[in-house]
Structure formats: C-alpha cells, structure tokens
Amino acid sequence: MGARDTELKKELDASLQARRELGEEYESALVDSFLEKVDQRIDAAVERRVRRQFAETQMAAARGGRSPGATDSWGERFGFGIVSLVLAVPLSAIGVGAADLPGLLVSWAGIVGVNVVQAARTNPGLFGGLRRKSSRDSDWEE
C-alpha cells in the first residue's frame, strides 16, 4: 500500500500545483478530478476484496465445506433443543401465572413454533417443501 499512497500523494501535489497555476476558477474541476481518482482507487480496492472473498467461498464449496450460514450439525440441533427445553420451564410458569391454562397453551405454542421454524430452516424438505434435485435424479422421472 505504501507505493499507492505515494502515488496518490503525488497526484494530490500535482492537483495543488495546477490549482496554484490555473487559479481559483478551476478549483472545483481540479478537486473533482482528484476525487474521481480517489473513487477509482477505492472501487478497485473493494473489487479486489469482493473477488477474493468470492474466490474463498468458491474454494470452500469446492472442498465440500459448509457455507457460513448453514446450521445442520447434530450438536447445534441438540443444543437448540436443550436450550428450548430449559427455557420452556420458566416460560410455562410465567404463562400459567399470568393466564392459567390459556397462558400455558400460548407459551407452549410459541416454543413449538420456534422449534418448527428452526427445523424447517435446517431441513428444507422436512415439511413437504420442494426437494432439491440430486445428481441421482433422472430428468425423465415425474
């Protein structure tokens, strides 16, 4: 980055020198020109970072690694179930204390709902959703 910084500094010095020679009437054009160069450098740096990140993601996929958002390991599902059961006890007590049986039913409906959403998220075809086509599936089968 040091070479780029010195190059950008040279361009700034050249813009300032041109402003001194041309006068204030060209100041906005010189500033716009310099800012355009800075924008191009920023865009190039962002482009390089995006390409690098994309390449890393592609390499991870090619190696069979999980995507960062995937949560399908047994330990994560087990942990979610345990946390869900541990939180069910105080939520049930609060529901019963606030509204007796209807409060208990509402609290358990929420617990079940959260677990259903989690199960659907980690297993997309679990509830009759669209099944992903595998390489073993034939295009001729209906």
Image (cartoon, helix red, strand yellow):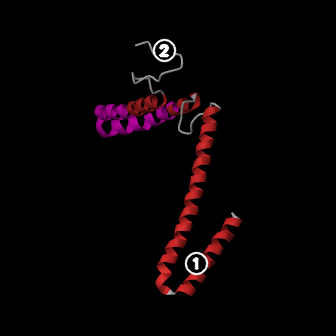
Magenta includes 98? yes
- Amino acid tagged 2: Ser
- Dividing the picture into quarters, in which one does residue 54 lie? top right
- Please name whichever residue, 72 or 49, is drawn nearer the observer in this view of the structure: 49
Q: Residue at x 60, y 52 (%)?
A: 49
Q: Are marks 2 and 1 in contact (CB under 8 Å)?
A: no
* Label 1 neighbour load within 10 Å: few <14, some 14-19, many 20+: some
Horizontal relation, residue 132 to residue 67: left or right: left
- Please name whichever residue, 58 or 117, is drawn nearer the observer in this view of the structure: 58
Q: What stretch is highlighted in magenta?
A: 81-110
Residue 133: image x %, image y %? 48, 22
Which residue matches tag 2? Answer: 138
- Dividing the picture into quarters, in which one does residue 61 lie? top right
Residue 2: image x %, image y %? 71, 66
Residue 22: image x %, image y %? 53, 85
Horizontal relation, residue 45 to residue 119: left or right: right
Which residue matches tag 1? Answer: 15
- Amino acid tagged 1: Ser
Label 1's element? helix
Horizontal relation, residue 28 to residue 67: left or right: left
Is residue 74 depicted above or below 6 in this figure? above
Horizontal relation, residue 82 to residue 105: left or right: right
